[in-house]
Image: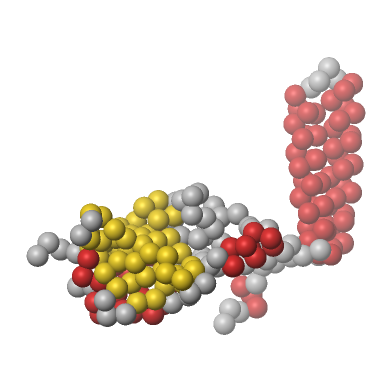
């Protein structure tokens, strides 16, 4: 627990008020001399510094009566670069929210209980995280594979129901998924504003 001596020091209110008045008075004096001395550089510099000091004192006084708001951070909700959605868009997005489920044969995404897309476990050959304007406000997990008809895969939003259970299952079913390299790739994606981050790739047999 931090000591009281470590807490940020605040300027007493009377000193802030005195500083504000003095800074404005000095700025006014320098401004008058600036205009009456053929735009003297010295008086112009003094006036500019004095107005800056007055603004700083004014901010200190304001913060004593109206403390600045503390910003909350949550990577899942406020992914870097993500814009807030309006209530109407949030409701529409919730209505078509994607869930992910799996069994012994495949991984599949659903919307309102109806299958959207799927990929067989034995066909999965890579897992990536994609953060882009196309998919904001959430990162997307791209689970790709090869099927009888060529490349195949699914896209799983980071807020999909069932994603946590799928992460645990991938540690057991995807060889080499549960290691430090995978964790580092996920951490790198969390700290990024955008990009394509390979998380896991199946080694050739």
85 or 73, which lies in front?
Answer: 85
- The colour style of the image is secondary structure
Q: Using the image, determine if residue 24 lies above or below residue 32.
A: below
Residue at point 82%, 52% (across, down): 58
Q: Residue 49: which quarter of the image? A: top right
Task: Say left or right for 4 vs 125.
Answer: right
Measured from the top left, where is residue 136 in percent x and y? 52, 55
Residue 165 horizontal/vertical position (percent):
39, 80
Quadrant for the N terminus in the image: bottom right
Q: Quadrant of residue 172?
A: bottom left
Which residue is at the front of the view, 194 or 48? 194
The front one of 127 and 78 is 127
Can residue 106 be spotted in the picture? yes
Q: Give the residue drawn at x 85%, y 37%.
A: 27
Q: Is residue 75 above or below residue 192?
A: below
Quarter of the figure with residue 36: top right
Residue at the far left in the pictured view: 205
**In this picture, residue 6 sits left or right of residue 57:** left
Picture coordinates of residue 55, whole percent (x, y)? 79, 47
**How many callouts does the rendering have?**
0
Q: Nearer the viewer, residue 204 or 4?
A: 204
Q: Is residue 159 left or right of residue 184?
A: right
Q: Position of residue 120 (x, y in %)?
A: 26, 69
Q: Quadrant of the C terminus?
A: bottom left
Instruction: State the residue at coordinates (48%, 74%).
Output: 113
Do we see residue 190 in this rendering? no
In the rendered image, the residue lying farthest to the bottom is 1
At 23% from the left edge and 56% from the top edge, which residue is drawn?
Answer: 149
């Amino acid at each position: 627990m931090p000591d009281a001596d470590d807490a940020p020091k605040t300027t007493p209110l009377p000193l802030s008020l005195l500083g504000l008045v003095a800074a404005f008075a000095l700025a006014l004096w320098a401004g008058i001399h600036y205009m009456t001395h053929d735009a003297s550089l010295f008086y112009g510099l003094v006036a500019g510094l004095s107005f800056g000091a007055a603004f700083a004192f004014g901010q200190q006084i304001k913060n004593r009566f109206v403390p600045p708001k503390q910003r909350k951070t949550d990577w899942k909700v406020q992914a870097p670069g993500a814009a807030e959605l309006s209530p109407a868009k949030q409701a529409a997005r919730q209505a078509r929210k994607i869930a992910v489920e799996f069994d012994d044969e495949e991984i599949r995404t659903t919307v309102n209980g109806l299958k959207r897309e799927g990929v067989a476990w034995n066909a999965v050959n890579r897992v990536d995280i994609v953060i882009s304007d196309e998919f904001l406000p959430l990162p997307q997990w791209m689970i790709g594979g090869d099927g009888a008809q060529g490349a195949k895969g699914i896209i799983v939003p980071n807020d999909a129901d069932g994603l946590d259970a799928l992460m645990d299952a991938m540690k057991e079913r995807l060889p080499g998924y549960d290691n430090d390299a995978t964790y580092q790739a996920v951490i790198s994606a969390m700290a990024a504003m955008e990009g394509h981050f390979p998380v896991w790739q199946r080694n050739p047999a």
